[in-house]
Image: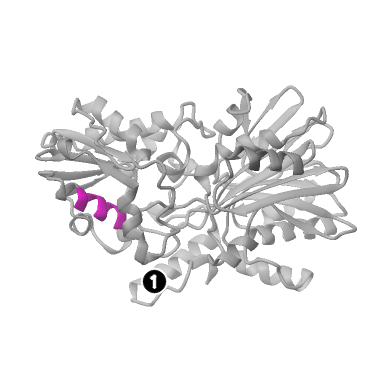
Amino acid sequence: MGEEISEACGIFGAVSKSSEPVFYYLYWGLLSLNHRGQQSYGFTTFSNGIFYKDEDLNLIPTDEESVKRLAKSLKGSVGISNARYATSGKSSIQHLHGGKQPLILGKKRGRKIAISYNGNLVNVKQLRSKLTEKFGKFTTDADTEVLGRQLLLGLEEYRGDFSRAVGLIMDEVEGAYSTLVIDEEGSLYAFRDVHGIRPFCFGKRGSLYAFASETPALEINNILSFDYVRPGELISVVTRLERKVLRRGKRNAICAFEFAYFSRPDSILNGTDKPVYKIREAFAKSLAQEYANKLKRNDIIISMPETADDAAYGLHEATGIPWERAVRKNRYVTRRAFISTKEGRKGVIEKKTNMVKEMIRGRRIALVEDSIVRGDTSKINIAKLRKLGAKRIDVYVTFPRITNPCFYGVDMATYGELIGSRFSDDEIAKYIGADSLNYQSIEGLVKAIGLPLSSLCLGCISGRYPTRTAQRIADRARESFSKGLDEQGRVYER
């Protein structure tokens, strides 16, 4: 991929109606979702009227001593957790600490909630302004607090009626939000925005109910039968599980980028009947049909990064060209490129992969990438392949050219940072050092996913968004960018 682009969060929640402690379910569930957010983690449990919380920056701890400490301190038979990457607010250490989820909000005496969510709010500035008048100054600049205070406002307005309060969110909050909440009585609630932009699933095993961003987080807890939180649906687990669709959007719009990059290959996203890795194989088979003549000039296939492995295998199956595993990730180089300073990013990227010179020298390479966003990582890796003696490098990209910012939880939020919004295919190929650049078509992408075009959010490649404010902001930002005006920060926060 052009860069390691980051998702907002991974969420996991569980409640045991037999009063069994849930920490270890939370721990294993969140650990299986750590790919969705690596800036911070957090756990919140509830027992006998008390919220217990543990959180920190960086990855979820895996050493035995830390896990035992967490298990001892996080009491209760209900809990929620979050692995976060910030797509709103500032990125200083101070602000990252303030934005850790789950967030506990409310009064010492009265309504109190713990909230964790995956997504991003489009009309966050307007909501923050309105809620500041009601609640006073916010304690963080993260949009989690905005969503939580909007929920508290609804609970106050509707005298504790959770269903009506969530309905008010769906009426007034625009964006993507797959959300978990524990209230002051220890009840667990899950709800999802009316378009279902971010994935959200749940399952049951005996007296245990669990909710997660992706299905492997359920399966690691031996929950093998699962369903999906529907767009606009509220699920409550008070005495038992109850489901109700509160609002219906004009259409469903699950993020297409989930299939190409974010989701684990072993996930099954709602609306599909096959795991993500089979869809990625289908992406490559579509590329093989579209670029059959071009592929005849390649003698090996290489994938970069690991999220392109399944597509590389699909391309190998479709063409018969050998897939060489000549690029290997240095597993313990965990510092991610998007967190690094600009000055140090190149060095980090170069250290993240090792390339087998003997398999590259003199070869005509079909390089499979899942997507190209800014192009810097592709440029560094292709230069490395050239240095090792590659004779030719043709790049095949499973996701169409990204030309527009995302408003719903992917941190690519300005036109200027997207190489596809500034340059043609040939110009991008020249910039990254490739002999040719060959993108997946939108038609090929949609066919491979197996969902109707109208059920997908393709805003980052089509410029057409499923929500009104996002479309208006994007249109204005595009006009400003075309006039050469400087972009200051994420478009939805300006």
Residue 111, how many percent across, how many down? 85, 55
Per the picture, the main secondary structure of the magenta-coloured stretch is helix
Give the residue at x 73% y 41%.
79
Is 261 part of what is drawn in magenta? no
Give the quarter of the image for residue 450.
top left
> What amino acid is labelled 1 in the image?
Glu
Residue 166 x/y as whole percent: 74, 50
In this picture, which residue range is highlighted in magenta?
Answer: 376-384
> Which residue is under mark 1?
479
Residue at point 71%, 37% (across, down): 23
Q: Nearer the viewer, residue 289 or 371?
A: 371
In the image, residue 128 above or below residue 205: below
Q: Position of residue 72 (x, y in %)?
A: 75, 40
Q: Is residue 383 magenta?
A: yes
Please state the total of marks drawn on the protein image: 1
**Residue 245, can we see it?**
no
Residue at (38%, 39%) from the top-left corner? 307
Q: Is residue 59 left or right of residue 361?
A: right
Mark 1 element type: helix
Pick the front one: 410 or 452: 410
Q: Is residue 246 left or right of residue 472?
A: right
